[in-house]
Amino acid sequence: MKLIDPHNPPALPDLEIYYEPEFIHPNRSEQLYNYLLKEVRWQHDKIRVFGKEYDQPRLTALYAKKGLSYGYSGIRMASHEMLPEMRLINRRLQKEHQQTYNAILLNLYRTGADSNGWHSDDEPELGKNPSIASISLGERRIFQMRHKQHKEMRFKFWLETGSLLIMSGSTQHHWQHQLPKTSKAIGQRINLTFRYLIDQSTKG
Ligand SMILES: O=C(O)CCC(=O)C(=O)O
Ligand SMILES: [Fe+2]
């Protein structure tokens, strides 16, 4: 798969990605990483894929506005209240990218054996054309993308520590992404994905 510079993404159909390498300053990203590793209430869920149960190959946690939950792969995650550091980042995303998010799904990849398989973030509570802002801390990992209809349209890039990736427009309709395993001995990585969840409890 072709390695690209995400700062200069290829002009491909239905693809809207924005990448900023040092959204979190290098000094700050180590601090933030250690803080989140310790303070986040990491959980290890089982997921259901084609009727079979598996241990998810990573730890996760959901922090969101009170009352919101998030369901995917046969699980529904209860949420915790956002930590002050999370609110600060959320406010920056609002100010610098004019995006409103009310939930953060966090992932902890403990080793190179932890991963996140091919998927689109297209759950009903995300609505149509969601904007998803993803922040990376700790070990850098490869991120792959492929078009759902045109399988030859695929590429990968590094998600560096402190970086911000925003996927928006119709990207989730037409593209899938994954964070593959690696056999290399590497450190842990924390990922925060900011999302806007439509409150399902108020929908008829
Ligand atoms: O860890 C990553 O960078 C990807 C996370 C992701 O795709 C997700 O949580 O939906
Ligand atoms: Fe995703």
Image (tube, grey):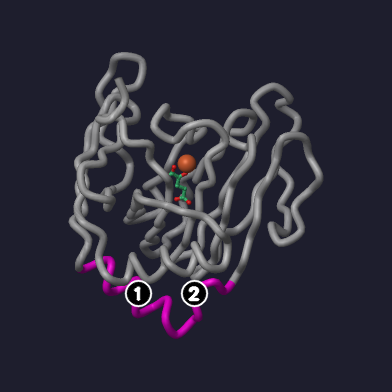
Crowding at label 2, few (<14), some or many (≥20) Cα neighbours within 10 Å?
A: some
At horizontal 38% and vertical 65% (from top left) the residue drawn is 187
Q: Earlier in the sequence, mark 1 or mark 2?
A: 2
Give the image quarter of residue 4: bottom right
Give the image quarter of residue 29: bottom left
Q: Residue furthest top?
A: 51
Q: Secondary structure at mark 1?
A: helix
Q: Are marks 1 and 2 in contact (CB under 8 Å)?
A: yes
Badge 1 residue CB within 8 Å of ligand 1:
no
Q: Which mark is residue 24?
A: 2
The residue closer to the viewer here, 151 or 196, is 196
Identity, as a three-letter code, of the amino acid under mark 2: Ile
Q: Position of residue 2 (x, y in %)?
A: 74, 46
- State which quarter of the image contains the N terminus: top right
Give the image quarter of residue 149: top right
Q: Main secondary structure of the magenta part?
A: helix
At horizontal 63% and vertical 60% (from top left) the residue drawn is 19
Q: Is residue 163 left or right of residue 117?
A: right
At horizontal 19% and vertical 52% (from top left) the residue drawn is 80
Residue that label 1 marks? 32
Q: Residue furthest right?
A: 11
At horizontal 42% and vertical 60% (from top left) the residue drawn is 185
Q: Residue furthest bottom?
A: 27
Q: Is residue 189 left or right of residue 160?
A: left
